[in-house]
Image (cartoon, coloured by chain):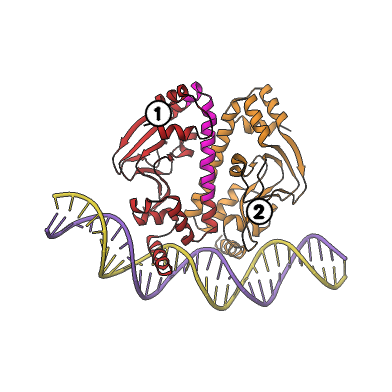
Chain colours: A red, B orange, C yellow, D purple
DNA sequence: GTTTTAGGTTGATGCAGGTTAAGAAATCCA
DNA sequence: TGGATTTCTTAACCTGCATCAACCTAAAAC
């Protein structure tokens, strides 16, 4: 069960089997059914979770009740509201499973304990946040420079297979456009082919 | 000289005077004249720098030679290309002083040495990256949800005084709009007032 | 002190993507 | 299986911001 998880953690920093076992003890293994809300806007996010299986979205709901999806997480990705979790402040976001989802999750208290027991993990998690930062900056950047059509093509590459797992209007939301616009983009693309 | 810097570092983690002195030894104090390029696209970013004084922009230049500004940094801010620095990969960005600028900067090798000498700093820098992540996510988020006018008003609050220090067309670039569009926004705002 | 030049404003026009609406297709579930 | 619901598509129209271009001002350069 921990195979992919261990590999994810050890990507940049060596960890002994013993250290890994301490880590495992602080994480909780959980399975949630489809459409479970793991976080609601206004709550403090109390988890960082690694996805073993399934699919999760993190999104915002505006005054009109429309949702904007900020992140999809699938197998071997992490999900949390980093800002809320780290500063232990209320979140603006919702986090929700889109399929039955299996997680390894840790809460704030356990994460701090873990850092005390295995200080090397400060480094591991620093590198994880740095990776997340690089991913986000890239997303921000392409959002400014690339038109919607290019972003859609990028999306297909970055999340292969997710098109089949997630309704199209949610992908449109992630891309920052309306479902109608995405539908038109697909139409012109298939005309071009 | 190190007063504000020390305070910035100690925001979340206590550090002794001795530890701070080790830190100081690994940072370099530098002053650059206006319009100095600290990083060019294609180079590996080899600094993380804390601004004592002055103003810096980080930007991208597209095929048409137009620049898009991703970040302004002023007093008590950090500047770097985190993705390039951390992974030691070529950057897509330029980093340039907009005024005479005084920095405390550290390179990759020294940062790693510093981590070995004062492991507690792993934590300090993890928290710094987390803060940077939260700031970036907020920017990304408002970029999607808010219209240009709101983003302009946000900008004025976030960077008080910068309007006077930076030409307006660069602020437009930061906001993701053209100078003409910003000019019109200002016109309608003063009409509303 | 006149001439460049950089920065800012204003107007006309165009286009990507938003909005609204309605029907078609797919999926869900009793 | 069949009706309900959810998702996708298409079309007509609208809007915010981009583009292009002319013009204005003020400061810098000669």
Question: Residue shown at 51%/35% (left/top)?
Answer: A11
> Circle 1 sits in a helix, a strand or a loop, which is it?
loop
Q: Residue A27 carries which label?
A: 1
- Label 1 environment density (alpha carbons within 10 Å; few <14, some 14–19, many ≥20): many
Q: Position of residue A170 (x, y in %)?
A: 37, 53
With respect to residue A94, does A127 lie above or below? Answer: above
Residue B30 lies in the magenta stretch: no
Residue A91 percent coordinates (x, y)? 43, 40
Please determine whether, in this image, residue A85 is positioned above or below residue B63.
Answer: above
Instruction: Please determine if labels 2 and 1 lie on a single subunit.
Output: no
Q: Is the magenta stretch mostly helix, strand or loop?
A: helix
**Quarter of the image where the N terminus of chain B is located:** top right
Tell whether position A113 is magenta.
yes
Name the element at disc 2.
helix
Q: In this view, does A85 lie to the left or right of B153?
A: left
Residue B146: x and y in percent read 49, 55
On screen, residue B48 versus residue D10, left or right, reads right
Which image quarter holds the C terminus of chain B?
bottom right
Q: Position of residue C19 (x, y in %)?
A: 39, 64
| Mark 2 neighbour class, 10 Å CA radius: few under 14, some 14 to 19, many 20 or more | few
Per the rendered image, the range of residues in magenta is: A112-138
Identify residue for label 2.
Answer: B163
């Amino acid at each position: 069960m921990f195979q992919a998880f261990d590999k994810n953690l050890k990507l940049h920093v060596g960890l002994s089997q013993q250290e890994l076992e301490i880590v495992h003890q602080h994480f909780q293994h959980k399975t949630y059914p489809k459409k479970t809300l793991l976080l609601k806007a206004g709550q403090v996010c109390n988890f960082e979770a690694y996805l073993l299986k399934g699919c999760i979205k993190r999104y915002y709901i505006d005054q009109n009740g429309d949702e904007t999806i900020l992140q999809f997480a699938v197998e071997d990705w992490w999900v949390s509201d980093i800002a809320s979790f780290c500063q232990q402040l209320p979140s603006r976001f919702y986090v929700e499973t889109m399929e039955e989802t299996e997680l390894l999750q840790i809460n704030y208290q356990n994460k701090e304990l873990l850092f005390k027991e295995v200080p090397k993990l400060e480094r591991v998690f620093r590198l994880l946040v740095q990776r997340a930062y690089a991913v986000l900056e890239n997303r921000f950047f392409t959002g400014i420079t690339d038109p919607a059509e290019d972003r859609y093509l990028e999306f297909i590459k970055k999340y292969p297979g997710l098109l089949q797992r997630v309704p199209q209007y949610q992908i449109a939301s992630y891309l920052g456009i309306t479902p109608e616009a995405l539908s038109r983009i697909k139409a012109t693309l298939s005309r071009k082919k």
